[in-house]
Image: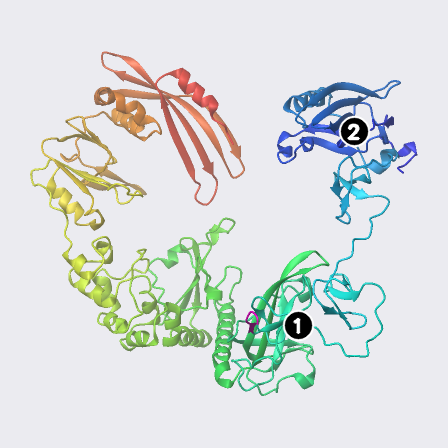
Amino acid sequence: MGHSHQQFWPAGARPVQLPARAEGSAKSWIKAVYGVTPDAAASHRSKGAALDGVFLERAGTYALQPGVLLVAYDKVGDEATVILYKVIDGDEPLSVVKKWANKQGILGQQMLNGITTQVKKTKGGPPRIGALADITLTEPPPQLNGREEDCHLCYQNVPAGQGVLARVEGRTRVQHSPACPLPPPQRNTYEQPCRRCRQNVPAGEGLRSKPYEHGPWEVIHDGVCPPPSETTTAAPAARVNGKPGPCTSCLQEVPAGTGELHGGPGNWSVKHRGSCPPHPLNPTGAPTWRITSSNSPTHGFREEGWAAGTVFRATLWNTPAEKLPAETVPGYARLDEQRVTFVAVSVAYTAYREKDYDDDEWYTYRKTILRVATPEEAAPVLAAEAKRARRAELARRAGDLLSVTKYKTIADSHHPSREELEGVELGQKVPLPSSVAGRNYPTTVHVNQATGLVWTWVHNGLDGDDWSSNNSGGGIVTRHPLTPERAALIADLRAEYDAPAALAAELRSTEAEITALLDAGWTGQQIRGTRRLFRLTEAGDGAALATRTPTQWEQAGWWDEFWYGQRKFAPADAARLADAGISPGKAAGRGDTVEEILAAAPPQIPADATRVLVLAPAGHRGSSPYPLAAMTAAQMTERLATSPKQWQWRIQADVGPHPVHVSRTGNWQVWDDNAVTLTYWAHPRPSHTEETGNSSQIVYHDDPAWPHAFTDDGERLIDLLLGARNGREIFGPHKLHWLQVARDATTTREQIDERRNDRHNGGCGATLYRHTITRPGQPDEHLWQMDEDDWYRGEDADVTVTSWLYRDEQSARAAYRAVKLR
């Protein structure tokens, strides 16, 4: 029963008894409706979920306010009847607004449209239903199920008319009435001993049962157990495993057909017959321990497991003292009263999934059987731990003695101004622990022994950083005196990170190759500088690289710490290329082997060509390198000499055409045969720089290789036609007209309209322009331009502008109005 006191009713509410379900209805519901959302019912057959609101019970009595809209649905056979009611003031509290029928049994679109119309007619929307307990006056009588379904409680079948309907989580479900019957007994499918009397129960004559919830299935006699037999009954033969699985005792694999099954359906496990075989990784039968972990709350979300043969540091919890290993075993330490740790070897491992019925979730469980590692086995683990400890201590000392973070100031450090840093030599770079240096913008430390100073550089260029502190690009440079403590730290850092083994591990090389370079006088930082360009993994690589000093490699063009190529060169191959004057950049694209690179040559171009084009092959992706154009074979040959990647491109050499106009940017050309090439002009443009006060500008000289037949406005017009999103569609069909216009045109641009949507971190907009093109003795022409732009206020302040062109005002304004500002 609900509340019967009116103080719980909504203002103006009155008792309203809802209509009962229609006779013979297989499905029936009624719902107080606030709105309609058709997309919410995409997966529902009757489309009732499209109605926003609260389900009520048929034939129930509720305290409802006038204006409440109710939708009643009944399905008899295949046809659905839908009635829209409205609560009103009057003798009859319910008024029928509309009635529909649908032969498909759903709320059709016409029904949803009609309900939507009535919702919109109610000012402010229909009144909403509060807590059902506050407005329920009488519970409706139980409603029988109209069709056969499974009970939502026990999952047994409920024939039509023998159960009742119940609302469960907003949906109508069927359940037994008054209570669910006991499930039918489940018989044992094979002979097993009875859980109560331990006598064998033949297959099909016993009952399966569980001693506790979620426990394994066991068998008991059907009824009273028979008296014990005077003759001993042999235990039933254990079932043989039909497929391989891990033994629950030793965790080793039990092949199919060789083990024994235990448990029951949903809880089967396998064991070896008789004794388990010895572990291959524990041939001496040393004491073992078992560790079980999982990602479940019971195990503290610790999912740890170690494959057989793994040497690792193990931790035992709450193990009796008599079962602990001796304190002399490798790596032994007591962490606290509950935990003991030592270096161990995994001798067996398994993992499986299991359901936790307390929270109805599946978790991964991992089991490992381990033994104590021998001193030889434990040595690498202990060495790695000692290495981590040394580097952690070095990181602590670096943080105490140097300004390696922008959040801490060292007492004797100095923050110089940009003027103080001009011409300062920072000195040699000092290796740092990765925990101090970081990854994306690594902190660096330099030492200058001659000046007795240590310098640090810390990145400070992210959004939200205080950029006013920067004195070197996007970072902060700090100066420190080279004290004995700092000198000792730098020596220890170099001893730790510049040792052959450390460098070999860092560069994925070998100690022999690193030693060859160190013996030749290379520093650790110089060796690190080779990581992108040179290979150091094969025998002899170090010796071949050491044949030149870093300075000599740099002079030969073979020193680039920022080399972005995918290829690393063998030092011996690099030496041959350096002798031939070929740098790594020039080698890219010439061939795969040194012989192919040395033999490669630029393509031959006819000497009398007056228009030479280098065009990308079919399927080429990317904007670099650019297609090229030139007016002489000599100039193109000179240009291709510096771009071997284009030696395999398509060459088009024509005799006769000459350029009449080259754009000032050099990215398009017009020829005297009216051809337009969208390529980069290969001829250099002579220029000089003029200083004006605190600024400078580049002044370009007139040159025959850069002809200009168009006016400045005409060039800007062609730029616009070639650069707009749809400009070439306008330019192409009337190319000759536009080329003639560009020779003598003057243009003016007028902003006609503008819309903006400005947000806190950026925005978007649309702008409409009109270009007026004026030519001597010709009527003015108009070209309409519509720009769509997006901008972002960040460190890079990105702006994207897309231009569209139109020949008439009507099309331009229609496109402008169609732009949706996000």
In this rendering, the answer to whether 701 lies above or below 414 is above
Q: Report which residue position mark 1 lands on.
A: 238
Task: Name the residue that disc number 2 marks.
Answer: 24
User: Dot 2: few (<14), some (14–19), or many (≥20) neighbours within 10 Å?
Assistant: few
Q: CA distance from mark 1 to mark 2?
A: 56 Å
- Looking at the image, which residue is at 21% across and 49% down? 643
Name the secondary structure under disc 2: loop
How many other residues sit within 10 Å of disc 1, few (<14), some (14-19) or many (≥20)?
few
The residues colored magenta run 253-257
Magenta run includes residue 254:
yes
Q: Residue furthest right?
A: 5
Q: Nearer the viewer, residue 746 or 353?
A: 353
Please state the horizontal and vertical placement of residue 154, each as a whole percent of the image.
Answer: 77, 49
Write down the quadrant of residue 177 in the picture.
top right
Q: Give the residue type that dot 1 points to.
A: Ala
Q: Which sits in the foreground, 24 or 733? A: 24
Task: Look at the image and say whether residue 751 sits in the magenta stretch.
Answer: no
Q: Position of residue 708 (x, y in %)?
A: 19, 29
